[in-house]
Structures are given as structure tokens and as C-alpha cells.
Amino acid sequence: MMDRKNFLKCSFFILGIIYFGHPAFSAETKDSCLECHKGLDEKKLSEPAHFSQNDVHVKIGISCADCHGGDQTSDDISVSMDTAKGFIGKPSKAEIPNFCARCHSDSDYMKRYNPNIPTDQLSKYDVSQHGRLNAQGDKKTAVCTSCHNAHNILDVNNPASPTYALNVPDTCAKCHSDKEYMKEYGIPTNQIDDYKQSVHGQALLVKGDRSSPSCKHCHGNHDAGLPRAIYVGNICSQCHALTYELFRKSPHKAAHDKLGIPECEACHGNHKIMKPSDDMLGTGQDAVCVKCHNSSSKGFKTALAIKSSIEDLKIEIAQAKELTAKAERSGMEVEDALFDIDEAGNSLTKARAYIHSFSEEEVDSVVNGGKSLAKKADEAARKEIDNFYFRRKGYVFAIALIFIFSLALYARIRIMEKNKKGGTGE
């Protein structure tokens, strides 16, 4: 009869055989594809065999034969590469989307490995600009391997992956920044340079903010295409929900729809979107409003009024800040005033968003709230400054009294000492 100790040893041994015997974990698994190709002199044939252990397929035990077919257990090339055993070999570029989709469009199959991976990539690709060109026989257009690589495919969260957030712009730029490659399509090639200067590009590539939009967020990834004018607002609203909601209710919405003008892009641009400034508003030299509205139009007057309202709030906040700083330097309590200034600053930010309503009344309703807060902070700071001067006068008066009292006391003491000396006959 087996004792408990030996039973546990035996159980762990059997479990180890089962676990490490799985193709994904066993170094002893027969794979004639790898063994043969690693020894080949031609780089394009040997390189794919040197898989990285970070490859997403290697990690889950998917082998060469799982994609290319054949019999990986045989060293006989006529058997291992036998079409009767399903050998496919290297697919043509045009065949690659359907080649990858054999697994990636099969939801039951994909659930075995990662249920979170979508299985609609092929259907999206087929309607994309790339997919349509591929269907037309264009041999230059992007397919799966153009972005993900053919072998050594890395997880999207791996910083070395071409689809990692910070790498996406350069991945797209491999084709889209190549003037010679893109010449026949009539597409500009300065997008990546413009994007890197933009507020989005700076946030992603300089600050490392992976939530900042890149090419795929606006154009799509598998369903990549050129956004038409009617789509632009909806695309931007994925992040800028409030501003688009305000714009959608504004008189500009109907005008843009009628004229076919891209909504957000008309004022902010597309790839080279710079950080908005108040100079864009109003009727000044850098104002975008005057591109469409002349000096006699209602839009011109509205832009001027909104700009003036924003500037008034900025002035009142600045004044409140200056007085509060003065009170703080004097050692007075200004916590409430600082809070109100912060809230006034939030109103300024909100008012800048409400500019997209293109309504003087809407903007003023927000601005007036900010002005009330700035005024409250201003009054609180003035009160503290007055208290400081009042206290300082009180301190001076108190010191003067103490000084006078001290002099009187000193004089009294001197008289007493003199009288004492006179009484003793000295």
C-alpha cells in the first residue's frame, strides 16, 4: 500500500509530465520545420525559425505547421511538406488576410486562448481602404503582416511591438511617409511630421500618454480609411464629448452639413492640431472666426463679444490672484480665497468649451459664474489685507504705549531713587 508521501511524489510527477509535455512548454516536442530552417543559409528562410519567446503564438504552443500546414513530426521533406497533409507554404500577400482569419475569425477557436480578442478583423479589413485595394489586386497595400509582422508577433502591450501605442505612428509612417511608395495614390506624406508637432503627438510621443489619440483612433486600425466630412465630428467626440454636443446644437452644425465642411477640422485642422489658445477666438489676426465671418456679419459680432467676455474673466481672475498672493505674503489666511480662484479658473476652462455653442448668452452664463467667484476671492483678499494693516497699526500703537509706559516707569524709578538718597542725607 502506497503511503501518503509517496502518493504525493507520484502525483506531482504525473502532473509534471502532463504540464510540461504540452507543446507550449516542452523543449522536446518534435518540430522538423524549426530544426530544418534554423540550419538553412538563406536568411529569409532561416530567420522565421528563430522565434522570440515573446511571440504570442509561441507562448500558447502554436507551431509552424498550425499556420503553414504539413507534418512537423517527419524529417522527410516529401512528408513534412506534403500538400496531402495540408501543407500551404508561404501565402501570397493578397491571401494573407484570409490566411490569418482562419483562426482570428473563428470565435470558438479564439475563446480557447483569449476571449477578449475580437474576431471581426477580417470583415473590417474587407471594407477598409487597404482591404478594397487588396481585393483589386494592389500588391502594395497593407495586409496583416504589414503592421503585425509575419513572425515574432508581439503582444500589443509589448513596447517592442509595432502596434504598441507609442509605435503606431511610425508603423503607419513606414508606408505613409514614403513619397515614392505613396506617389501613385495621390496621398500627402507629411502626416507623421505634422502629427508629431500636434498636441496629440506631443502627448503620446513626448509625454508618453498612451491614451492620447494616434492614427488608429481617427482612421481606424483594421477598418482604416479616410474620414469623410460628415464623420469628423463623431470621431472627435469620442474624446471631446462636451464640445461636440455644444457644437451639434449650435447654428454652425446646420451650416457645416449644408456646405459639406468638416466640423472640428475646419477650425482645428487634422494631423497638425495645435493646443487651442484664446487668440483663435474673436476677430484678431490669429482668430479662426474671421476666415468665414466678415465685419458686417452677426458671427463676427458674436465672436467679438465672446472673446471680450472671456478676456474680462481672465482679468478678474488675475486681479484676485494678485491680491490673494499679497495677503498670503503678509501671513494672512487665504485658503477660502484660493479655493474660489481655483473654481473661477474651472469656470474659465468651461467657458472655453462653451465657445463651441457659438452663443454669447451660453458663454456669458458660465463666465458670470466665474466672475462672481473671482470677485468673492478679491473681496476676501482685500479684507485680509485691511486686517493686516489694521493689526499693524494696532501693533504700532501698542508698542508706542509700551514705550511711553516704560519711559514713565523709568522716570518714576529715577525720582524714587533720588528721593531715597535725599532722605538719608547723602
Image (cartoon, rainbow, N blue to C red):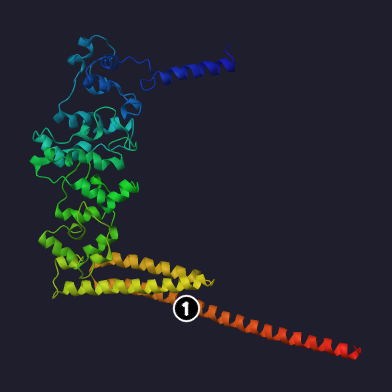
Say few, some or many: other residues with alpha carbon within 10 Å of mark 1 (under 14 / 14 to 19 / 20 or more).
some
Could you tell me how many numbered marks the image carries?
1
Is residue 45 visible to us here? yes
The image shows residue 180, relative to residue 259, as above or below, that is above
* Rendered-image quadrant of the C terminus: bottom right
> Would you name the residue on which mark 1 appears?
382
> Image quarter for residue 260?
bottom left
The image shows residue 409, relative to residue 153, as above or below, that is below
Q: Residue furthest top?
A: 76
Q: Secondary structure at mark 1?
A: helix
Is residue 211 visible to us here? no
- Give the amino acid type for the residue marked by disc 1 in the picture: Arg
Task: From the top left corner, tell me how far across and down residue 54 is, in percent.
Answer: 35, 29
Left or right of residue 113, residue 306 in this image? left
Task: From the top left corner, tell me how far across and down residue 347 is, in percent.
Answer: 36, 68
Task: From the top left corner, tell me how far across and down residue 220 is, in percent.
Answer: 22, 45
* Rendered-image quadrant of the N terminus: top right
Residue drawn at point x = 15 percent, y = 55 percent:
230
Task: From the top left corner, tell me how far across and down residue 156 is, in percent.
Answer: 31, 37
Viewer-closest of 307 and 252: 307
Residue drawn at point x = 21 percent, y = 41 percent:
173
The image shows residue 233, relative to residue 50, as above or below, that is below
Left or right of residue 226, residue 9 in this image? right
Viewer-closest of 16 and 193: 193
Q: Residue furthest right?
A: 424
Residue drawn at point x = 29 percent, y = 30 percent:
153
